[in-house]
Image (tube, grey):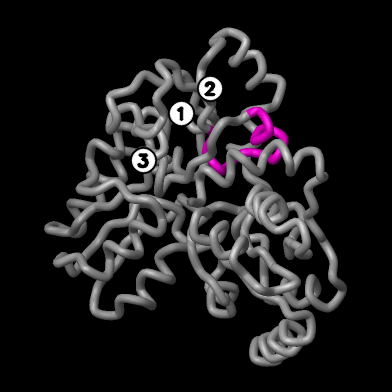
Amino acid sequence: MTEQLVRRIQELKKKRNAAILVHSYQPPEVQDIADILGDSLELSRQAAQSSADVIVFCGVHFMAETASILCPRKTILLPDITAGCPMADMVSVEKLRELKARHPGAIVVAYVNTTADVKTETDICCTSANAVQIVNGVAAKEIIFVPDRNLGQYVARCTGKKLTYVEGYCPVHARILAEHIEQARREHPGADVIAHPECSPEVIDRADRVLSTSGMCAYAKTAAARDIIVATETGILYRLRKENPGKRFYPATELAVCSNMKKNSLRKVLDALELMQHEVRVSDEVRAKARKAIDGMIV
């Protein structure tokens, strides 16, 4: 059945002149059909550069919105239209406007894990891969950072800058606790620990390296360590093991599973292409306001 689904997807992909962009947290069978496999920044760049007429974005809703902003002439399909991001919902346009009113003159840096509407009130976006670089490049004395407090705290630590942020967080990374890292080290002595900056400060303090998902994939290929404990969503382990067969990767905890990232499937990708369903399209007004903030992120 899987082979039949993949074959039909490939046929429709050719017929529709489609590209399948897949986040590294997606289910293994979806990762296996990716034209591009990566993190938010990599996928945003590829969406902007792709010659495809249709992009099937196997991720969550804010990612498809970002692709629509960057590619207004393309059809962006999200295989499961209910795949959202709880963190993105933790900051609204109204909440951000209130924060800006209390801090006039502040520059707003928004994690790409935000809605298109929030991006319209943002000066520049960032991802976990370039957040430190982006904030270092901001000359303003005051910086508002939304919505992830953990990433904000990590960026403040790395840059020495004072950030004001809302109390948003990733529920999946919040499940990874300091005690999980300590237990994993006991079970795998000598292993490296890599952690995503969406993790809590307590987890980051116990990691050997703090890396984005793309950073983790790059590090795994060159690391001297043969055993690596990974503190992020468990979906990335499939990619890490596939790309580095001579190394062993262990989840910091099996609890770090994003149910939204796991909503997409081969059947839903096929249905999206067959029926051209679940299109995500951002209005011209929102796109015009949000585009500048996103362009600053992807250069």
At numbered mark 2, what does the secondary structure look like: helix, strand or loop? loop
Res 50 → quadrant = bottom right
Q: Is residue 48 left or right of residue 237?
A: right
Q: Position of residue 153 (x, y in %)?
A: 37, 28
Specify which label sits upstream in the sequence, 3 or 2.
3
Q: Which residue in the rendered view is the most extreme toward the right?
A: 275
Magenta-span inclusion, residue 120: yes
Q: Which mark is residue 210?
A: none
- Numbered tag placed on residue 149 in the rendering: 1
Circle 1 crowding by C-alpha within 10 Å: few under 14, some 14–19, many from 20? many
Q: Nearer the viewer, residue 237 or 143?
A: 143
Labels 2 and 1 touching (C-beta < 8 A): yes
Q: Which residues are magenta?
A: 110-121
Relative to 295, residue 20 above or below: below
Tally the marks. Answer: 3
User: CB of mark 3 within 8 Å of CB of mark 2?
Assistant: no
Residue shown at 49%/27% (left/top)? 145
Indicate the position of residue 37 as horizontal and vertical percent values. 51, 69
The amino acid pointed to by label 2 is: Val
Q: Amino acid at mark 3?
A: Gln
Question: Is disc 3 placed on a helix, strand or loop?
Answer: helix
**Residue located beneath label 2 in the image:** 166
Labelled pair 1, 3 in contact (Cβ < 8 Å): no
Residue at 38%, 77% (x, y): give it. Answer: 242
Q: Which residue is mark 3?
A: 133
- Kind of residue at badge 1: Arg
